[in-house]
Amino acid sequence: MSPIVVVLLLFAGLSEAAGRILPLVARRPGMSRTLVAGFLLPAGLVEGAVFALWPLTAWTMTESVLSSPSPGTGLVWTPGMVAPLVLAAVLAFPLLGPLLHFLLFVGVGAGLVGPLATASGLGWWSAAGCVAVAGAGLGLAVETVRRLVVRISATRVQEAAA
Amino acid sequence: MNGFLLWACLVGPALLAEALLARYEVLAYGAGWRVPATVLPEGVPYARGASADSPPGAFLVYLDGIGKRRVRDSRDGGQLVEALIAGAPELRVLGQVQPYSPLADPLADRPVWAWLRRHIGVVLFLHNVVQTFVAADHRYRPLYNRAVGSQIATQLRLAGYLPDSGTPVVLLSYSGGAQVATGAVDELHTQLRCPLLLITLGGFHNGANDLTHAEHLHQLTSANDRIEQIGAWIFPQRWRLLRGSKWNQAVRAGKITVHRLEPATHFGPQSYISPTAQLPDGRSHLARTADTVIAVIRVHHGSALAQGDPRT
Protein backbone atom coordinates (compact mmCIF):
# COMPACT_ATOMS: atom_id res chain seq x y z
CA MET A 1 0.00 0.00 0.00
CA SER A 2 1.54 3.29 -1.09
CA PRO A 3 2.02 6.17 1.40
CA ILE A 4 -0.48 8.33 -0.52
CA VAL A 5 -3.14 5.63 -0.16
CA VAL A 6 -2.42 5.38 3.58
CA VAL A 7 -2.77 9.16 3.97
CA LEU A 8 -5.99 9.18 1.94
CA LEU A 9 -7.40 6.30 4.00
CA LEU A 10 -6.57 8.21 7.19
CA PHE A 11 -8.32 11.33 5.91
CA ALA A 12 -11.27 9.26 4.71
CA GLY A 13 -11.50 7.61 8.13
CA LEU A 14 -11.42 10.97 9.91
CA SER A 15 -14.00 12.32 7.48
CA GLU A 16 -16.32 9.36 8.10
CA ALA A 17 -15.82 9.65 11.87
CA ALA A 18 -16.59 13.38 11.77
CA GLY A 19 -19.75 12.73 9.78
CA ARG A 20 -20.93 10.22 12.37
CA ILE A 21 -19.71 11.78 15.61
CA LEU A 22 -20.67 15.43 15.12
CA PRO A 23 -24.45 14.85 15.07
CA LEU A 24 -24.02 12.82 18.27
CA VAL A 25 -21.98 15.57 19.92
CA ALA A 26 -24.80 18.01 19.24
CA ARG A 27 -27.09 15.83 21.39
CA ARG A 28 -24.60 15.37 24.24
CA PRO A 29 -24.31 18.59 26.24
CA GLY A 30 -21.10 19.11 28.15
CA MET A 31 -18.68 17.53 25.69
CA SER A 32 -15.60 19.70 25.34
CA ARG A 33 -13.86 20.39 22.04
CA THR A 34 -10.81 18.48 23.35
CA LEU A 35 -12.95 15.45 24.11
CA VAL A 36 -14.52 15.58 20.65
CA ALA A 37 -11.07 15.77 19.05
CA GLY A 38 -10.03 12.89 21.31
CA PHE A 39 -12.94 10.81 20.00
CA LEU A 40 -12.30 11.75 16.39
CA LEU A 41 -8.74 10.49 16.15
CA PRO A 42 -9.26 6.86 17.30
CA ALA A 43 -12.62 6.68 15.53
CA GLY A 44 -10.94 7.95 12.36
CA LEU A 45 -8.24 5.31 12.66
CA VAL A 46 -10.85 2.56 13.07
CA GLU A 47 -12.92 3.83 10.14
CA GLY A 48 -9.77 4.14 8.00
CA ALA A 49 -8.79 0.57 8.88
CA VAL A 50 -12.25 -0.65 7.88
CA PHE A 51 -11.95 1.16 4.56
CA ALA A 52 -8.53 -0.45 4.07
CA LEU A 53 -10.08 -3.88 4.60
CA TRP A 54 -12.81 -3.45 2.00
CA PRO A 55 -10.83 -4.59 -1.13
CA LEU A 56 -9.07 -7.30 0.88
CA THR A 57 -12.40 -8.67 2.13
CA ALA A 58 -13.94 -8.51 -1.35
CA TRP A 59 -10.91 -10.38 -2.74
CA THR A 60 -11.18 -13.06 -0.04
CA MET A 61 -14.87 -13.52 -0.85
CA THR A 62 -14.08 -13.76 -4.56
CA GLU A 63 -11.52 -16.50 -3.94
CA SER A 64 -14.04 -18.40 -1.85
CA VAL A 65 -16.60 -18.43 -4.68
CA LEU A 66 -14.15 -19.32 -7.44
CA SER A 67 -13.86 -23.01 -8.30
CA SER A 68 -10.27 -22.64 -9.53
CA PRO A 69 -7.44 -20.38 -8.28
CA SER A 70 -7.74 -16.83 -9.56
CA PRO A 71 -5.12 -15.53 -12.01
CA GLY A 72 -4.59 -12.24 -10.07
CA THR A 73 -2.68 -11.56 -6.88
CA GLY A 74 -5.26 -9.47 -5.12
CA LEU A 75 -7.17 -6.20 -5.03
CA VAL A 76 -5.73 -3.03 -3.51
CA TRP A 77 -6.81 0.58 -3.26
CA THR A 78 -5.37 3.05 -5.72
CA PRO A 79 -5.33 6.78 -4.90
CA GLY A 80 -8.01 7.45 -7.53
CA MET A 81 -10.35 4.80 -6.12
CA VAL A 82 -10.02 5.78 -2.47
CA ALA A 83 -9.97 9.60 -2.90
CA PRO A 84 -13.77 10.09 -3.08
CA LEU A 85 -14.09 8.57 0.41
CA VAL A 86 -12.44 11.69 1.81
CA LEU A 87 -15.84 13.30 1.26
CA ALA A 88 -17.49 10.80 3.64
CA ALA A 89 -18.30 13.62 6.11
CA VAL A 90 -21.10 14.46 3.70
CA LEU A 91 -23.07 12.16 6.02
CA ALA A 92 -23.48 15.11 8.37
CA PHE A 93 -24.92 17.26 5.59
CA PRO A 94 -28.35 18.36 6.71
CA LEU A 95 -31.33 16.46 5.33
CA LEU A 96 -29.65 14.96 2.24
CA GLY A 97 -26.58 13.66 4.08
CA PRO A 98 -27.45 9.96 4.42
CA LEU A 99 -28.55 9.74 0.77
CA LEU A 100 -25.38 11.46 -0.49
CA HIS A 101 -23.30 9.21 1.78
CA PHE A 102 -24.99 6.12 0.33
CA LEU A 103 -24.45 7.32 -3.25
CA LEU A 104 -20.78 8.02 -2.48
CA PHE A 105 -20.28 4.47 -1.25
CA VAL A 106 -22.13 2.98 -4.21
CA GLY A 107 -19.87 4.98 -6.52
CA VAL A 108 -16.67 3.93 -4.74
CA GLY A 109 -17.85 0.32 -4.59
CA ALA A 110 -18.58 0.40 -8.33
CA GLY A 111 -15.02 1.60 -8.83
CA LEU A 112 -13.72 -1.53 -7.09
CA VAL A 113 -15.80 -3.95 -9.18
CA GLY A 114 -13.95 -3.55 -12.51
CA PRO A 115 -10.43 -4.20 -11.13
CA LEU A 116 -11.77 -7.11 -9.04
CA ALA A 117 -13.46 -8.70 -12.05
CA THR A 118 -10.29 -8.28 -14.14
CA ALA A 119 -7.95 -9.64 -11.46
CA SER A 120 -10.11 -12.61 -10.48
CA GLY A 121 -11.64 -13.53 -13.83
CA LEU A 122 -15.07 -13.40 -12.20
CA GLY A 123 -18.03 -11.87 -14.09
CA TRP A 124 -18.88 -8.20 -13.43
CA TRP A 125 -22.10 -8.92 -11.55
CA SER A 126 -20.49 -11.63 -9.40
CA ALA A 127 -17.63 -9.27 -8.59
CA ALA A 128 -20.17 -6.55 -7.77
CA GLY A 129 -21.89 -8.98 -5.43
CA CYS A 130 -18.61 -9.74 -3.64
CA VAL A 131 -17.83 -6.02 -3.25
CA ALA A 132 -21.35 -5.30 -1.99
CA VAL A 133 -21.40 -8.18 0.51
CA ALA A 134 -17.91 -7.31 1.74
CA GLY A 135 -18.88 -3.64 2.15
CA ALA A 136 -22.16 -4.47 3.86
CA GLY A 137 -20.47 -6.97 6.19
CA LEU A 138 -17.78 -4.52 7.21
CA GLY A 139 -20.37 -1.78 7.59
CA LEU A 140 -22.48 -4.01 9.81
CA ALA A 141 -19.48 -4.95 11.94
CA VAL A 142 -18.36 -1.38 12.48
CA GLU A 143 -21.95 -0.26 13.15
CA THR A 144 -22.21 -2.91 15.89
CA VAL A 145 -19.02 -1.58 17.46
CA ARG A 146 -20.31 2.01 17.20
CA ARG A 147 -23.57 1.11 18.93
CA LEU A 148 -21.72 -0.74 21.68
CA VAL A 149 -19.46 2.26 22.28
CA VAL A 150 -22.47 4.61 22.39
CA ARG A 151 -24.31 2.29 24.80
CA ILE A 152 -21.31 1.87 27.09
CA SER A 153 -20.53 5.59 27.13
CA ALA A 154 -24.20 6.40 27.82
CA THR A 155 -24.20 3.96 30.75
CA ARG A 156 -21.07 5.61 32.13
CA VAL A 157 -22.65 9.07 31.84
CA GLN A 158 -25.73 7.82 33.72
CA GLU A 159 -23.58 6.22 36.42
CA ALA A 160 -21.56 9.43 36.78
CA ALA A 161 -24.76 11.46 37.10
CA ALA A 162 -26.27 9.09 39.71
CA MET B 1 -13.53 27.93 -17.31
CA ASN B 2 -16.79 26.45 -18.55
CA GLY B 3 -19.93 26.12 -16.47
CA PHE B 4 -19.38 22.51 -15.49
CA LEU B 5 -15.83 23.12 -14.27
CA LEU B 6 -16.99 26.16 -12.31
CA TRP B 7 -19.59 24.01 -10.56
CA ALA B 8 -17.27 21.05 -10.05
CA CYS B 9 -14.25 22.99 -8.79
CA LEU B 10 -15.63 26.07 -7.07
CA VAL B 11 -19.34 26.28 -6.46
CA GLY B 12 -19.89 22.62 -5.57
CA PRO B 13 -17.20 22.37 -2.87
CA ALA B 14 -18.19 25.81 -1.56
CA LEU B 15 -21.80 24.68 -1.23
CA LEU B 16 -20.69 21.49 0.47
CA ALA B 17 -18.39 23.32 2.87
CA GLU B 18 -21.11 25.82 3.72
CA ALA B 19 -23.65 23.07 4.26
CA LEU B 20 -21.27 21.22 6.58
CA LEU B 21 -20.26 24.35 8.45
CA ALA B 22 -23.84 25.53 8.86
CA ARG B 23 -24.61 22.98 11.53
CA TYR B 24 -21.62 24.03 13.63
CA GLU B 25 -23.86 26.57 15.35
CA VAL B 26 -26.40 24.02 16.52
CA LEU B 27 -23.48 21.79 17.51
CA ALA B 28 -21.94 24.60 19.61
CA TYR B 29 -25.35 25.20 21.23
CA GLY B 30 -25.98 21.52 21.92
CA ALA B 31 -22.54 20.83 23.33
CA GLY B 32 -22.73 23.99 25.43
CA TRP B 33 -19.65 25.57 23.84
CA ARG B 34 -21.45 28.89 23.47
CA VAL B 35 -24.35 30.52 25.27
CA PRO B 36 -27.06 32.15 23.13
CA ALA B 37 -27.14 35.94 23.13
CA THR B 38 -30.08 37.61 24.86
CA VAL B 39 -29.22 41.31 24.95
CA LEU B 40 -30.18 43.40 21.94
CA PRO B 41 -27.93 46.09 20.44
CA GLU B 42 -28.25 49.55 21.98
CA GLY B 43 -31.31 51.42 20.80
CA VAL B 44 -33.22 48.32 19.62
CA PRO B 45 -36.45 47.87 21.62
CA TYR B 46 -37.54 44.42 22.81
CA ALA B 47 -40.97 45.06 21.30
CA ARG B 48 -42.93 47.72 19.50
CA GLY B 49 -46.62 48.52 19.21
CA ALA B 50 -48.84 48.28 22.27
CA SER B 51 -47.35 49.82 25.40
CA ALA B 52 -45.78 47.61 28.03
CA ASP B 53 -47.78 49.41 30.75
CA SER B 54 -50.82 47.17 30.33
CA PRO B 55 -51.28 43.66 28.89
CA PRO B 56 -51.57 43.86 25.09
CA GLY B 57 -54.21 42.01 23.06
CA ALA B 58 -51.50 39.58 21.99
CA PHE B 59 -47.75 39.32 21.55
CA LEU B 60 -46.80 38.81 17.92
CA VAL B 61 -43.38 37.39 17.07
CA TYR B 62 -42.37 37.85 13.44
CA LEU B 63 -40.06 35.13 12.12
CA ASP B 64 -38.69 36.41 8.87
CA GLY B 65 -37.69 34.54 5.71
CA ILE B 66 -34.14 33.65 4.76
CA GLY B 67 -33.24 37.30 4.17
CA LYS B 68 -32.97 37.83 7.94
CA ARG B 69 -29.35 38.65 8.72
CA ARG B 70 -29.46 41.19 11.53
CA VAL B 71 -31.57 42.09 14.54
CA ARG B 72 -33.04 45.15 12.87
CA ASP B 73 -33.56 44.17 9.26
CA SER B 74 -36.23 42.16 7.57
CA ARG B 75 -36.63 41.05 4.01
CA ASP B 76 -39.20 43.74 3.21
CA GLY B 77 -37.49 46.54 5.07
CA GLY B 78 -39.89 46.07 7.97
CA GLN B 79 -42.98 47.09 5.98
CA LEU B 80 -45.15 44.14 7.06
CA VAL B 81 -44.34 44.70 10.73
CA GLU B 82 -45.02 48.42 10.32
CA ALA B 83 -48.36 47.68 8.66
CA LEU B 84 -49.31 45.28 11.46
CA ILE B 85 -48.42 47.78 14.17
CA ALA B 86 -50.37 50.50 12.35
CA GLY B 87 -53.40 48.29 11.77
CA ALA B 88 -53.52 46.57 15.15
CA PRO B 89 -52.35 48.87 17.93
CA GLU B 90 -53.39 46.24 20.49
CA LEU B 91 -50.50 43.99 19.39
CA ARG B 92 -47.03 44.02 20.94
CA VAL B 93 -44.70 43.05 18.10
CA LEU B 94 -41.25 41.44 18.31
CA GLY B 95 -39.13 41.34 15.17
CA GLN B 96 -35.66 40.70 16.58
CA VAL B 97 -35.71 36.90 16.81
CA GLN B 98 -33.04 35.24 14.66
CA PRO B 99 -34.80 32.18 13.19
CA TYR B 100 -31.65 31.00 11.44
CA SER B 101 -29.28 31.23 14.37
CA PRO B 102 -29.60 28.83 17.32
CA LEU B 103 -27.13 31.07 19.16
CA ALA B 104 -29.18 34.20 18.40
CA ASP B 105 -26.09 35.62 16.75
CA PRO B 106 -27.00 37.86 13.80
CA LEU B 107 -25.13 36.65 10.75
CA ALA B 108 -24.27 40.05 9.31
CA ASP B 109 -22.65 41.18 12.57
CA ARG B 110 -20.00 38.43 12.52
CA PRO B 111 -16.64 39.60 11.13
CA VAL B 112 -16.21 37.14 8.23
CA TRP B 113 -19.88 37.21 7.32
CA ALA B 114 -19.91 41.02 7.30
CA TRP B 115 -17.14 40.90 4.69
CA LEU B 116 -19.03 38.23 2.71
CA ARG B 117 -22.20 40.33 2.84
CA ARG B 118 -20.38 43.20 1.16
CA HIS B 119 -18.71 41.04 -1.50
CA ILE B 120 -20.79 37.87 -2.04
CA GLY B 121 -24.16 38.68 -0.47
CA VAL B 122 -25.79 35.54 -1.85
CA VAL B 123 -23.71 33.44 0.57
CA LEU B 124 -25.74 34.80 3.48
CA PHE B 125 -28.97 33.67 1.84
CA LEU B 126 -27.38 30.28 1.21
CA HIS B 127 -26.38 30.02 4.87
CA ASN B 128 -29.94 30.70 6.00
CA VAL B 129 -31.34 28.23 3.47
CA VAL B 130 -29.04 25.57 4.87
CA GLN B 131 -30.05 26.50 8.42
CA THR B 132 -33.64 25.77 7.39
CA PHE B 133 -32.53 22.31 6.29
CA VAL B 134 -30.60 21.84 9.54
CA ALA B 135 -33.79 22.72 11.40
CA ALA B 136 -35.67 20.13 9.32
CA ASP B 137 -33.08 17.33 9.67
CA HIS B 138 -34.24 14.70 12.17
CA ARG B 139 -30.78 14.52 13.78
CA TYR B 140 -30.63 18.23 14.62
CA ARG B 141 -34.29 19.22 14.72
CA PRO B 142 -35.02 18.65 18.46
CA LEU B 143 -32.00 20.70 19.41
CA TYR B 144 -32.66 23.43 16.87
CA ASN B 145 -36.28 23.66 17.99
CA ARG B 146 -35.22 23.96 21.62
CA ALA B 147 -32.63 26.62 20.79
CA VAL B 148 -34.91 28.90 18.82
CA GLY B 149 -37.90 28.16 21.07
CA SER B 150 -35.80 29.29 24.04
CA GLN B 151 -34.67 32.36 22.13
CA ILE B 152 -38.30 33.33 21.43
CA ALA B 153 -39.34 32.67 25.05
CA THR B 154 -36.46 34.79 26.34
CA GLN B 155 -37.26 37.67 24.01
CA LEU B 156 -40.95 37.47 24.97
CA ARG B 157 -40.05 37.66 28.67
CA LEU B 158 -37.76 40.63 28.01
CA ALA B 159 -40.62 42.26 26.10
CA GLY B 160 -42.85 41.96 29.15
CA TYR B 161 -44.56 38.60 28.67
CA LEU B 162 -45.58 36.94 31.93
CA PRO B 163 -45.67 33.13 31.89
CA ASP B 164 -49.10 31.68 32.75
CA SER B 165 -50.69 35.09 32.12
CA GLY B 166 -52.92 33.65 29.39
CA THR B 167 -51.97 36.44 26.99
CA PRO B 168 -51.98 34.98 23.48
CA VAL B 169 -48.75 34.63 21.55
CA VAL B 170 -48.86 34.70 17.75
CA LEU B 171 -45.95 33.36 15.71
CA LEU B 172 -46.15 34.97 12.28
CA SER B 173 -43.63 33.27 10.01
CA TYR B 174 -42.58 33.93 6.48
CA SER B 175 -41.19 31.21 4.22
CA GLY B 176 -38.47 29.20 6.06
CA GLY B 177 -39.52 30.90 9.29
CA ALA B 178 -42.42 28.41 9.30
CA GLN B 179 -40.01 25.54 9.97
CA VAL B 180 -38.73 27.37 13.03
CA ALA B 181 -42.17 28.53 14.16
CA THR B 182 -43.67 25.04 14.10
CA GLY B 183 -40.57 23.75 15.88
CA ALA B 184 -40.79 26.34 18.66
CA VAL B 185 -44.28 25.27 19.79
CA ASP B 186 -43.25 22.71 22.41
CA GLU B 187 -40.55 24.87 24.00
CA LEU B 188 -42.88 27.87 24.23
CA HIS B 189 -45.56 25.70 25.79
CA THR B 190 -43.05 24.35 28.30
CA GLN B 191 -41.54 27.71 29.24
CA LEU B 192 -44.50 30.10 29.00
CA ARG B 193 -47.62 27.91 28.85
CA CYS B 194 -49.12 30.50 26.51
CA PRO B 195 -52.07 30.20 24.12
CA LEU B 196 -50.22 29.87 20.85
CA LEU B 197 -51.47 30.79 17.39
CA LEU B 198 -49.37 30.16 14.29
CA ILE B 199 -49.69 32.05 11.01
CA THR B 200 -47.51 30.97 8.11
CA LEU B 201 -47.03 33.16 5.07
CA GLY B 202 -45.73 31.11 2.14
CA GLY B 203 -44.58 28.66 4.82
CA PHE B 204 -41.71 26.31 3.94
CA HIS B 205 -41.58 23.50 6.51
CA ASN B 206 -41.25 19.73 6.69
CA GLY B 207 -44.42 18.96 8.65
CA ALA B 208 -42.55 16.89 11.24
CA ASN B 209 -43.06 19.19 14.21
CA ASP B 210 -45.76 18.46 16.76
CA LEU B 211 -48.53 21.07 16.78
CA THR B 212 -50.46 19.58 19.72
CA HIS B 213 -49.74 22.59 21.92
CA ALA B 214 -50.63 25.14 19.24
CA GLU B 215 -54.23 26.30 19.27
CA HIS B 216 -54.39 26.68 15.50
CA LEU B 217 -52.28 27.21 12.40
CA HIS B 218 -53.45 29.59 9.69
CA GLN B 219 -51.74 28.93 6.39
CA LEU B 220 -51.61 31.98 4.13
CA THR B 221 -50.76 30.74 0.68
CA SER B 222 -51.28 31.16 -3.03
CA ALA B 223 -51.37 28.89 -6.07
CA ASN B 224 -48.54 31.04 -7.47
CA ASP B 225 -46.25 30.35 -4.51
CA ARG B 226 -43.74 27.88 -5.90
CA ILE B 227 -41.51 27.83 -2.80
CA GLU B 228 -44.31 26.72 -0.49
CA GLN B 229 -45.33 24.08 -3.01
CA ILE B 230 -41.76 22.76 -3.18
CA GLY B 231 -41.87 22.29 0.60
CA ALA B 232 -45.09 20.32 0.33
CA TRP B 233 -43.54 18.13 -2.38
CA ILE B 234 -40.10 17.37 -0.99
CA PHE B 235 -41.03 16.59 2.61
CA PRO B 236 -42.84 13.23 2.92
CA GLN B 237 -44.45 14.29 6.21
CA ARG B 238 -46.44 16.82 4.22
CA TRP B 239 -47.85 14.15 1.87
CA ARG B 240 -51.40 12.99 2.56
CA LEU B 241 -50.16 9.43 2.19
CA LEU B 242 -48.31 9.60 5.52
CA ARG B 243 -51.40 9.86 7.68
CA GLY B 244 -49.47 9.48 10.91
CA SER B 245 -47.21 12.51 10.38
CA LYS B 246 -47.52 15.39 12.82
CA TRP B 247 -48.74 17.66 10.03
CA ASN B 248 -51.49 15.25 8.96
CA GLN B 249 -52.48 14.73 12.59
CA ALA B 250 -52.93 18.49 12.91
CA VAL B 251 -54.93 18.56 9.66
CA ARG B 252 -57.24 15.79 10.91
CA ALA B 253 -57.62 17.58 14.24
CA GLY B 254 -58.98 20.59 12.34
CA LYS B 255 -56.06 22.75 13.41
CA ILE B 256 -55.12 24.01 9.95
CA THR B 257 -57.02 26.70 8.11
CA VAL B 258 -55.94 27.71 4.62
CA HIS B 259 -56.34 31.27 3.38
CA ARG B 260 -55.81 31.88 -0.33
CA LEU B 261 -53.98 35.05 -1.28
CA GLU B 262 -53.98 34.75 -5.08
CA PRO B 263 -52.37 36.06 -7.22
CA ALA B 264 -49.49 36.73 -4.83
CA THR B 265 -46.14 35.04 -5.38
CA HIS B 266 -43.51 34.01 -2.83
CA PHE B 267 -41.14 36.83 -3.73
CA GLY B 268 -40.66 39.49 -6.36
CA PRO B 269 -42.83 42.44 -7.38
CA GLN B 270 -46.03 40.38 -7.01
CA SER B 271 -45.16 38.93 -3.62
CA TYR B 272 -47.40 38.73 -0.54
CA ILE B 273 -45.65 41.77 0.90
CA SER B 274 -45.38 43.92 -2.20
CA PRO B 275 -46.50 47.48 -1.47
CA THR B 276 -46.86 48.21 -5.19
CA ALA B 277 -48.77 45.19 -6.58
CA GLN B 278 -52.45 46.17 -6.63
CA LEU B 279 -55.58 44.06 -6.15
CA PRO B 280 -58.91 44.76 -7.89
CA ASP B 281 -60.23 46.27 -4.66
CA GLY B 282 -57.45 48.87 -4.73
CA ARG B 283 -55.40 47.45 -1.86
CA SER B 284 -51.76 46.50 -2.23
CA HIS B 285 -50.65 42.91 -1.62
CA LEU B 286 -48.93 44.13 1.53
CA ALA B 287 -52.11 45.76 2.83
CA ARG B 288 -54.18 42.63 2.13
CA THR B 289 -51.65 40.40 3.87
CA ALA B 290 -51.54 42.69 6.91
CA ASP B 291 -55.36 42.90 6.96
CA THR B 292 -55.65 39.12 6.78
CA VAL B 293 -53.15 38.56 9.59
CA ILE B 294 -54.90 41.09 11.82
CA ALA B 295 -58.33 39.68 11.03
CA VAL B 296 -57.16 36.13 11.80
CA ILE B 297 -55.75 37.21 15.15
CA ARG B 298 -58.85 39.18 16.10
CA VAL B 299 -61.27 36.47 15.04
CA HIS B 300 -59.26 33.79 16.77
CA HIS B 301 -58.99 35.59 20.06
CA GLY B 302 -62.45 37.11 19.96
CA SER B 303 -61.12 40.63 20.44
CA ALA B 304 -63.61 43.44 20.91
CA LEU B 305 -62.15 44.90 17.74
CA ALA B 306 -63.05 41.84 15.68
CA GLN B 307 -63.75 42.68 12.09
CA GLY B 308 -65.35 39.43 10.94
CA ASP B 309 -63.94 36.51 9.05
CA PRO B 310 -60.55 36.81 7.43
CA ARG B 311 -60.66 37.53 3.74
CA THR B 312 -59.97 34.34 1.93
Image (tube, coloured by chain):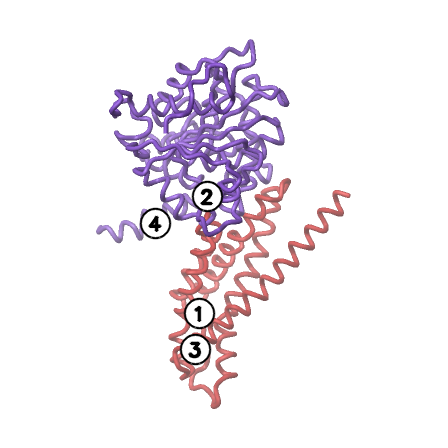
Chain colours: A red, B purple
Chain that bears disc 1:
A
Distance CA(mark 3)–CA(mark 4): 32 Å
Q: Secondary structure at mark 2?
A: loop
In the visual, does B265 lie left or right of B189? left
Residue at position x 38%, y 22% from top?
A: B290
Q: Secondary structure at mark 1?
A: loop
Residue B8: x %, y % from top left: 31, 53
Residue for badge 4: B12
Residue A27: x %, y % from top left: 59, 44
Farthest-out residue, bottom? A68
Farthest-out residue, front? B308
- Residue B206's disc is 2
In the visual, does A3 lie left or right of B120? right
Residue for badge 1: A77
In the visual, does A108 lie left or right of A150? left
Foreground label between 2 and 3: 2
- Same subunit, tags 2 and 3: no
Q: Upstream in the sequence, badge 1 or badge 3?
A: 1
